Image (cartoon, grey):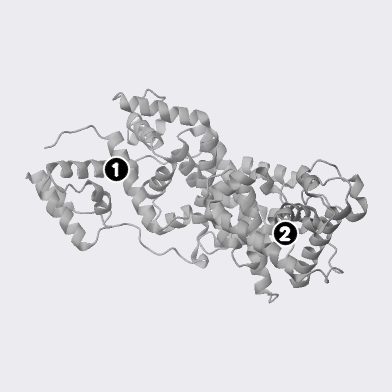
Amino acid sequence: MSAADLQLLERGAVVSRRTAEPQGFRADPDAELVERWQAGDAAAFAQLVGRHQARVYRLVLRMLGNAEEAEDVAQEAFLSLHRHGRRFRREARFSTFLYRVATNAALNRRRTLSRLRAREEEFGRRQAAGDHLPATPRDPEGAALGAEVQERVQQALMGLSADLRAAIVLYDIEGQSYREISRILDIPEGTVKSRIHRARGALRTLLMPVEGES
Amino acid sequence: MRGCVGEDLGAYLEGDLEVRERARVEAHLLDCGRCRNELRDLRATVALLRRLPTPMPPRDLTPAVMARIDAEGRRSRWPQALPPLDGPAVLGLLAAGLACLALVGLWQPGGVDPAGSGSEPAPQREATGPQIAAGDDAIRRSRRPTVEAWSPAARLPRLQRVASFSSGVAPLSGFAELPQAATSQREREFDRQLERLMGDPAAFLARMGPDVRGERFARLAQHAARRGAAGQVANRLIAVSHPLADDLAPRFLAASLAADLERSAGLR
């Protein structure tokens, strides 16, 4: 066993980062705006959109893998929120409820878009052929990670089933806790964990070069 | 090597393993290069995910969202709220539905338009039977001026359709003499529907199709609220991946809210 291996082990398991209980509604930073909106104040809803549009956009972008669709679906998510959310019962945090609506909007869109499925199949074929780096337009925002790597990660995400993708995006990209994801997806926490672990395992297979036994 | 722990590495990485399991994984990692590599790759994968940039929307979405909400409001696609029902009103509506059923079943010469939904008020529907658009084959087929028409199988679809316009009629008194058994039968049917809905929402939605937009599902939602289950059903629907879930969930949310309001106002 090498020194590097020992170092790897010493770092040990990452302690679960997000085990805190969600705050009550009163402590929810959106509580006041939500109350005003539910009392009929359209300006309050506009403020909620402004405040949360980035995270909704980010979530649906990672779920759909396409910027144009993401913009449209993010809008739809807020429309859906406006339609249904007057009955948001404030048992969970507003952001949890919003994630739920947005995840649903993304899943609905995904199912209706056969071309997306075709794209996933295409990616699957490329994976099978050992081509891990599809040629795609560069995204200037990807400079930090490298546009190609970024695209590769996104494509790998698209190679997951929608269930696994929703779980991993909410956890590793959006930083939600198991408990919150359990509420967002309406599945038990144990299922959340197993989906995250399965998703990571699948991503690892898609992203990492195959290595022999050492 | 034997006993590889690949399955557990995800849980190990997140600290989700019990102490004993964790010790087992760590002992194995000391001996197994393949699993160490796998753990390293898994860490690298998570690092990649967490280093993804956080893109912003290409433009402020607020104006477009608010414009679409305005447009939607003008179409008034959804009723803003279902009317909260107190006990007598519930009985009245139920009675109205049953009375209409009787009228439709016994001597309505035409059919009933099932797509008419609750959005169109239908004042004095009983007196205008012949003018109602034909087209509901199910009702026409099952229209028999006998007691047979009251068999559960024959009644359910008709009850549902009757409910779809009875909210527009809404005479709230004068039907108290209807048999209690009919009410409980109807409730049992609703219970069965709720069971199917909760059991497999996607299959339920697929079977019902666009009918779920009809007013009768508002009745189902109100029934669920009386059972104290409307919020649960709504949550289930919100989570399900089906285009019609967004159409049906508001019914249950609304019914749940109405029930809450009534409870908090001491009406229940």
Image x and y of residue B152, in percent: 71, 58
Image x and y of residue B61, in percent: 58, 41
**Chain letter of the residue carrying label 2:** B
Q: Residue furthest bottom?
A: B266
Taking the spot 41% from the left edge, 40% from the top edge, the residue there is A161
Q: Secondary structure at mark 2?
A: loop
- Between A69 and A126, the one lying in front of the other is A126
Taking the spot 70% from the left edge, 56% from the top edge, the residue there is B218
Task: Name the amino acid type tagged 1.
Answer: Gly
Question: Which quadrant does the N terminus of chain B fall into?
Answer: top left
Count residues near mark 2 (Cα–Cα under 10 Å), then give few for <14, some for 14-19, many for 20+.
some
Task: Name the amino acid type tagged 2.
Answer: Leu
Let me know if residue B59 appears in the view.
no
**Chain letter of the residue carrying label 1:** A
Let me know if residue B193 appears in the view.
yes
Which of the 4 quarters of the picture holds residue B228?
A: bottom right
Image vertical order of residue B138 relative to residue B177, above or below: above
- Between B137 and B193, the one lying in front of the other is B137
Left or right: A77, with A177 as reference point: right
Image x and y of residue B220, in percent: 67, 58
| Label 2 sits on residue | B82
Image vertical order of residue B246 relative to residue B94, above or below: above
Question: Which quadrant does the C terminus of chain B fall into?
Answer: bottom right
| Label 1 sits on residue | A201
User: Which label number is shown at residue B139?
Assistant: none
Which of the 4 quarters of the picture holds residue B103?
A: bottom right
